[in-house]
Image (spheres, coloured by chain):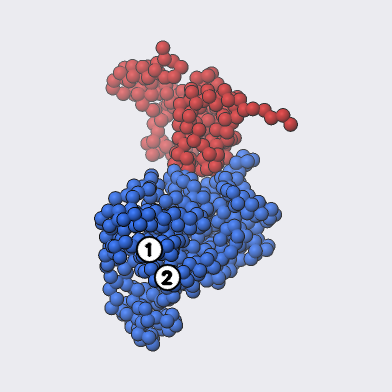
Amino acid sequence: MATKAYDKSFREEVYDKVDAGEEIKLCMQCGVCGITCPLRDEMTYGPRQIWSLIRAGKRDEVMNCSDIMLCTSCYTCKVRCPRGVKVIDVMHGLAHYALQEGIVPRENTSKFGKFFWNSIYKTGRIDETEVPMRYSMRRGPIHGIFETLEMMDIGRALLSHKRMHFKLGPGIPPSKKIKGIKGLKKMLDKAEAMSPGKEA
Amino acid sequence: MGQAILVVGGGMSGVSAALEAAEAGYDVVLVEKNPYLGGRVAQLHQYFPKLCPPYCGLEINFKRIKSNPRIQVITMAEVTAIEGEPGAYKATVSQAPRYVNEKCTACGLCSEAVEATVPNPFNYGLDEIKAAYLPHEMAYPFRYVIDGSIVEGDQGAKAKEACPYDAVDLEDQGSETVIEAAAVVWAAGWSPYGPAKIEYYNFAANPNLISNVQMERLAAKGGPTEGKIQRPGDGAEPKNVAFIQCAGSRDVNHLPFCSTVCCLASLKQATYVREQLPGAEVTIYFIDIRAMDRNEDFYSQVKADEKINFVKSKIGLIESDGEGNLILEGEDTTSGERFKAEHDLVVLATGMQPNTDLTKIPADMVYDEYGFVQAAEGIFGAGTVRRPSEVHVSVQDGTGAALKAIQLVAGR
């Protein structure tokens, strides 16, 4: 049987372009990351197998895999990794790189990220009512109403503990802005201009 | 005595160094912390790969020591200070009280008279021993020890009263002596890495989760179960035993290096189980099996046993099923499957921590990042304080250290 050599180009691309991408060189494929992950049942591959796919040159499998956007940054894998691989940094690096390349590995996470970012960018704070409200409306108002109704018990509990305030709808009434929001926007704009893929 | 060689540690490396130097015509002082010689080797059931009893060779060495007037053995002692320079050292040796003098015939009457017990360090805490005890049945020197905890009070008095040879000395204060030596061989050995430090293995909460050094004692005739492999939790015969390799080894959070012996130790211990319990299944969970040169043949032999399974996975979590069995979770890295596996006895293959990482040599020495001793002039590391190694390598290393020490003494 003829053997086929691994395609090294994607590996080199990750080392070169993904934030913390070179970290995976340290991996010895023990599997602890995959088993310590609290979202292991949701993951298709888990970090170890993703590293392995990168080494094997499987660009499409990795870039389109929702795993790289599922990481919640709980840090358990990073703490337990016997080789000290910065697993989370690589996962976030891969997700960021996929977006940069125009690939959305996980639609929901990507949208939530946008609403989260917009809230900070516009008001300088996370509005705990505004963000989930906009998120639930991501597929239109009808879907939003059904999804909101499903979450009603949690919403009531949050309201009664004053963890959430009442709103009629997104932007009604508008969220309060922090003082100096203009300065913050300047900072964020500059940071974005400096981010990989955007510079020069 | 100014030309003597001081050997610190009476395990395999230290005994080898002492004997080689003494038999070449040099005076040797051998200092050992335990009440007996032989170190960790004395606690092993069998050697790999030949599966022969370590005591066979130890006995020959003890006989050589006994018949050689050039070797002075000081047990229950530690070297607390070293001053001077290569060729002219002064070492302070602090000896703890044994409360039993050289008149002891090891008749055992003191032990019979005493009721108090203490945890048995020789069996790694798996059982208790009378507070007046022979460290183990093949101990050299063959002399009892009285635990300091019973010296004051009626238990100590009972032991003294029971001794027909006037060998019990409750007034023993220990001693501190200064030894002049031209060279020092530091062979203080290793300690098993503490399995409780790997918090996701829940070692302390599960009695049927043991370490590999404890497994040696479970299989040994002189051990807590007289050699029967049983679950410490309930004494039941295990039917499905797991070995977890690299428990705390090759791990930047614990021991970052490979101890080189744990793979072979587990392969060997798998044969203990299979020999004694023909119905039992064994599974070895590993990252890589590191069985080099002649040991690879042993690996092949063990692998040929259909009841010994190999799973390429570092176990990431151990939990109790609430009834004494253990649930292991891991990812089989050959298939990519995540699994949960139930076992009734689980052995953690913990690694070797050099004792120089835990207690430094009381002299100006250089260590690597893991606490292993680096080469120096006049004070020579030997055995597992220099690098993790199996027994025959320790013998070679002890011999090498003896040669270095001799060169220093002979050159003067």
Between B328 and B56, the one lying in front of the other is: B56
Which chain gets the red colouring?
A: A
> Quadrant location of residue B343?
bottom right
Asked whether the residues under marks 1 and 2 belong to the same chain, the reply is yes
Residue B199 locus on image (x, y percent): 45, 51
Instruction: Report which colour depicts chain B.
Output: blue
* Sequence-earlier tag: 1 or 2: 1
Between B124 and B289, the one lying in front of the other is: B289
A65 relative to B121 in the view: left or right:
right
Q: Amino acid at mark 1?
A: Tyr
Question: What kind of element bears circle 2?
Answer: loop
- Within 10 Å of disc 1 (Cα), the crowding (few <14, some 14-19, many 20+) is many
The quarter of the rendered structure image containing the C terminus of chain B is bottom left
Discs 1, 2 touching: Cβ within 8 Å: no
Please name the residue that numbered disc 1 is placed on: B26
Depicted A151 relative to depicted B330: above or below: above
Marks 1 and 2 sit apart, C-alpha to C-alpha, by 11 Å
Between A154 and A97, the one lying in front of the other is: A97
- The residue shown at (47%, 51%) is B388
Please name the residue that numbered disc 2 is placed on: B68
A49 relative to B146 in the view: left or right:
right
- The residue shown at (62%, 28%) is A6
Depicted A16 relative to depicted B209: above or below: above
B298 relative to A101 in the view: left or right:
right
